[in-house]
Amino acid sequence: MKTDNNTELYFGDVYKPVPQSRRDFLKKLGGGVIVVFCLGKLSVIQGFGQNTSEDLLNFNAYLRVKEDGRVDCYTGKIEMGQGITTSLAQVLAEELEISIYSIDMIMGDTELCPYDAGTWGSLTTRFTDPVLRAAAAEAREVLIDLAAENLGVSEEMLDVSNGTVFVKNNEKLKVTYATLTKGKKIVKTLKKKPEIKKSKDFKIIGKPVISLDSESKVTGKAKYAGDIKLPGMVYATIIRPAVFNSKKIKVDSSELSSFKGAELVEDENLVAVVHLDPEIANKAAKKVRVTWETPEHIADNETIFQYFDDNIKEKNIFEESGNLTTGRENSDIIVEAKYYDGYKAHASIETHSATCHFKDDKLIMWASSQTPFGTREQLAKTFDMPLEKVHLKQIFLGGGFGGKIYNRQAIEAAKIAKLCGKPVQLVWSRKEEFMYDRFRTAALMKATSGVDANGNLKLWEFDIYCAGTRGTKLFYGIANNRTRMFNEDDIHPFGTGAWRAPGNNSTTFARESHIDATAHAAGIDALKFRLDNLENEKMLNTLKLAARTFDWKRKKQEGHGYGIALGEDAGTSVAMIAEVYVDKTTGEVQPIRVVCAQDMGQVVNPHGATLQTEGGITMGLGYALYEDIEFNGGRIKSKSFNNYEITKFSKTPKIECVFIDKMDSKTQGGGEPAIICVGGAIANAVFDACGARVNRMPITPKRILETLQNG
Amino acid sequence: MKQSISFKLNHQSVSLNVNGDESLLTVLRTYLDKTGTKYGCGLGDCGACTVLIDNEPIRSCMILVEDVAGKEILTIEGLSSNGTLHPIQKSFIEHDALQCGFCTPGMILNAYGLLIRNPNPTREYILKGMEENLCRCGSYNRIIDAIQTASKEMNKKIKL
């Protein structure tokens, strides 16, 4: 999943008029002022695989100022807890001069919202914000035009505040948006770069705003895909093989007759039981015997790294400069090491769910999906239906983290609904979630560094197996370097995919562990070593802010250690410093405190950015310390939270988030960046606390004790 | 076997004809439309389905509906009264102690159970009592803060 090639996209290209078909569509909306914003082919989704159909790119955002003065904001993005319901409302309210509480978010509905390839890659704030701000700024101008006519004054004499246009020197002469839009139907297409506010004029952007959707969530009113109930709906349970990718040989459903109302549904490898009662569907499914042909065993969670090393020959150079031989010659100390990271589950508390029905000639679905438009395409293809006959509806997601972009459950639910002819709900069990989640890939990284007698890095060689190169562009100044990516499709014994900042968690862990090991070998303090070798000013300033906030020189308590990690993701620089306590007799790690400094450009909602950072760190402690998918070939042994531990209350440290103040700059990513540094910061803190350099995540007590014993 | 089972749900009497060996979670969600109670694992590991049964926080996926006959059940839908949010709900909003919101109903009811048992809990007590409820979005610290704030607010009300 590439994101970095999108960074130049900022009002870059505004040229394409809205095609006729879309105009017709807009006419179907109610009255008011509708502003459409087009970026033509250079949409926010440039560079993403799903964006293949040109006719979908007609517009990227629009909003409607309604006749009651409220504003509908339409976006193809979805809300999964990352807080864009709030931050998008903030930027819209800022430009339109209205209260954020008068905005209604219409998200991820494939009939109402503009096309969007998916909510991922920390892209929303970077690329949807500018578009929405532009549309809102345009709407404001349209409303000022209308007000000028209404009040009989020139536009220059008018100003706007809180949904009301007024005459600057006579504030009693005023008219509300509601009055202006009443009985009107104005559709405006933005054709030029609009005048958007400068940061000095911001009233809402940059101010902390608590989540606007939280009341619906604390009252149980928020609806998720499994909360939808359709008349006559049946619940489906799919009979799964024990081994991933098994092929069905035969089905014995003779015992099904003892469950009144249970119905068997079969389509190639999909075998399911449906019933009006979910538990009966479950019990009945257990009585259906399916004989499976299991695929060849590849490797297990111990041997997989050697398997990568032996079998992946495909490679390409991602970055290279200078000469590695020169680098070696110029180095007084050479440090070589291998780093390992196991497979991780997304482990959202909501499992993959979908509720759907075929009604007339349409398929209507609520699905826990980060890609409603992608789901629509997948479904249309599956059933050979026109795209417009498939309708994905707005719904909350109970967490996503990259795991809900593949939509297997949506296809399964729709196939079952088609076959049984009834509305269907499919909610994966936790065990299914642990099998068909597309895991974060395991990764092997080989690092070689060289440092001279003055503590200057002279050599950097980095070979990455399976984790990709996201965020690996060197920000340390090392003249002789080479980063290579080794990859091969279908090398894994089960499905893998994007996991919050794909690959960057593994590679940042490896690089930052290795930088620490190199500093240690050279006898130099880990902070000083980084400060001396960084050549990227943005990163340097971010690290300085982190060090100052943490107070790096602070006296350590017995058994405690400090660790630094730096990383880049989604345009944001991250510097993290962790403090841990390690019990040397048990190897138990207790995270004490984490400071995270970030340069994410303009921060739209500092509170929301803090929540995302805290969340990323808390989730990240899981991959660093506990999470590991155990498997034997395609047989996944981690099946529940009982044997796949994630971070819990008692293991959550004190977290402090600080941001570089850059209100005048572009927004950068906020949902993913912080998490990438957790592994490295913890590994380095563990080393500092007890002397165990554990090169494999998760850094378990067993691995710490083994490392200590083996020296 | 279907049987008639009665209990109190959110202060109202409920009688229904269901299989007694169904989980309370299934019955709440499927037959009583109380979808605020969430399925997270079905194994008692995550706490998303926590409800109060006679003021005790219980994993509704792990209890059979026949075992709650005659008892009082409180789900997230019954926590606010006459449109006024419960102090714990308010406090979760103020502290923004949630992101995706899926674990939230279970968190809130587990917290309510703790505060009923101990209206003046220490941070440690809350931590221990909440430990087995899982949140993947990472709102743990804020949840603890929210519960502490709520406990103070609830005590104020009792004194009045």
Image (cartoon, coloured by chain):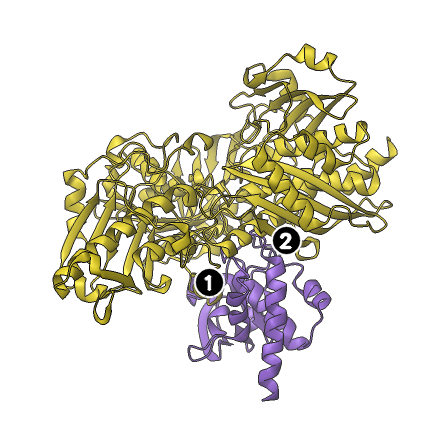
Chain colours: A yellow, B purple
Callout 1 environment at 10 Å: few (<14), some (14 to 19), or many (20+)?
A: many
Q: In which quarter of the image is residue B23?
A: bottom right
In the picture as drawn, the residue positioned furthest to the top comes out as: A325
Name the spot of residue A545 as percent of width and height, x first.
Answer: 63, 46
- Please state the chain letter of the residue tagged with numbered disc 1 in the rendered image: A
The one nearer the camera, A91 or A488, is A91
Q: Is residue A585 left or right of residue A97?
A: right
Query: Which residue appears at 59% of the width and 67% of the height?
Result: B146
Residue A656 is marked as 2
Q: Mark 1 points at which residue?
A: A214
Tag in front: 1 or 2:
2
The answer to whether residue B123 of the structure is visible from this angle is yes
Query: Which residue appears at 21% of the width and 60% of the height?
Result: A157
- Residue A125 sits above or below residue B28 on the image: above
- Residue B136 sits above or below residue A98 on the image: above
- Residue A463 sits above or below residue B144 on the image: above
Q: In which quarter of the image is residue A301?
A: top right
Q: What element carries label 1?
A: helix
For the C terminus of chain A, the quadrant is top right
Callout 2 environment at 10 Å: few (<14), some (14 to 19), or many (20+)?
A: some
The one nearer the camera, A397 or A542, is A542
- Please state the chain letter of the residue tagged with numbered disc 2 in the rendered image: A
The one nearer the camera, A257 or A263, is A263
> How far is mark 1 from mark 2, CA to CA?
23 Å
Q: Is residue A374 left or right of residue A122?
A: left
The one nearer the camera, A266 or A660, is A660
> Residue flagged by tag 1: what amino acid is it?
Ser
Name the spot of residue A356 as percent of width and height, x first.
Answer: 34, 49
The answer to whether residue A262 of the structure is visible from this angle is no
